Amino acid sequence: MSALDDQTILRETAIRVLDARGLVLEDVEIRHGGRMPQVRLVVDLPEDQLGSVDLDTVADASRALSEVVDADDAVLGSTPVLLEVTTPGVDRTLTQPRHFRRSRGHLLALTVADGTSYRARLLAVHGEDLHLRQEPGRDDRGRPLKRPQGTIERPVIPIADVTTARVEVEFDPPADLAQQLADAENTAADHPTAQKES
């Protein structure tokens, strides 16, 4: 079995290098074909941090990983490979609890098991529940849309009920977002199942 087939040493090495830079390994993608195999390491911030990964930190991690790979054939083998270190990007599908925790404060488009769709801001993740505030958006004339009738303004949805979820690109988040997140975290801790939708 080649080093590319058994990713154990690669993952251990990447985790060590990334951890020293405050990053976590999100995924490893290996593509065969072309002139040389491509190894793509997807990195992110730890789940308790908000914001985006600093690109200088990603570049530093990429240089450090390249040096390790060049010095030690046990990591990726002796055959040349194209190594890329990147971030998940805004189009990532949110599938794991850590993805949701990293997306606190963002506007999400999500669908739950019963087919209900939401456009809502993720204010808190408490246990396995998402604490949201619905934000229906605006029509093509810029007028605010109304929340679908019969829906709760601040639903609490179990992560297990979510079938699809993505972060929506947003150019003007609320100015008081930090306060909204703090208030939601306090409310979620005091009343974890308030307004729960099933």
Image: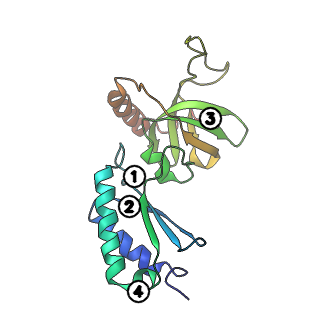
For the residues carrying marks 3 and 4, which lies nearer the camera in this image?
A: 4
Amino acid carrying mark 2 in the image: Val
Q: Secondary structure at mark 1?
A: loop
Q: Inspect this view and state whether residue 16 appears.
A: no
Q: Are marks 2 and 4 in contact (CB under 8 Å)?
A: no
Q: Are marks 3 and 2 in contact (CB under 8 Å)?
A: no
Quickly name the residue at label 2.
24
The residue nearer to you, when weighing 193 against 136, is: 136
Q: Secondary structure at mark 3?
A: loop
Residue neighbourhood size for the residue with mark 4, other residues' Cα within 10 Å, grouped as few (<14), some (14–19), many (≥20): some
Q: Inspect this view and state whether residue 163 appears.
A: yes
User: Above or below — where is 153 with respect to 51?
Assistant: above
Give residue 74's mark.
4
Q: Are marks 1 and 4 in contact (CB under 8 Å)?
A: no
Q: Earlier in the sequence, mark 2 or mark 4?
A: 2
Amino acid carrying mark 1 in the image: Glu
Q: Position of residue 17 (x, y in %)?
A: 31, 69
Q: Earlier in the sequence, mark 3 or mark 4?
A: 4
Residue neighbourhood size for the residue with mark 1, other residues' Cα within 10 Å, grouped as few (<14), some (14–19), many (≥20): some
> For the residues marked 3 and 1, what is the alpha-carbon distance in whole angstroms?
25 Å
What residue is rendered at 64% in x and 24% in y? 151
Q: Earlier in the sequence, mark 1 or mark 4?
A: 1
For the residues carrying marks 3 and 1, which lies nearer the camera in this image?
A: 1
Give residue 47's mark.
1
Q: Position of residue 154 (x, y in %)?
A: 53, 27
Give residue 197's mark.
3
Q: Earlier in the sequence, mark 3 or mark 1?
A: 1
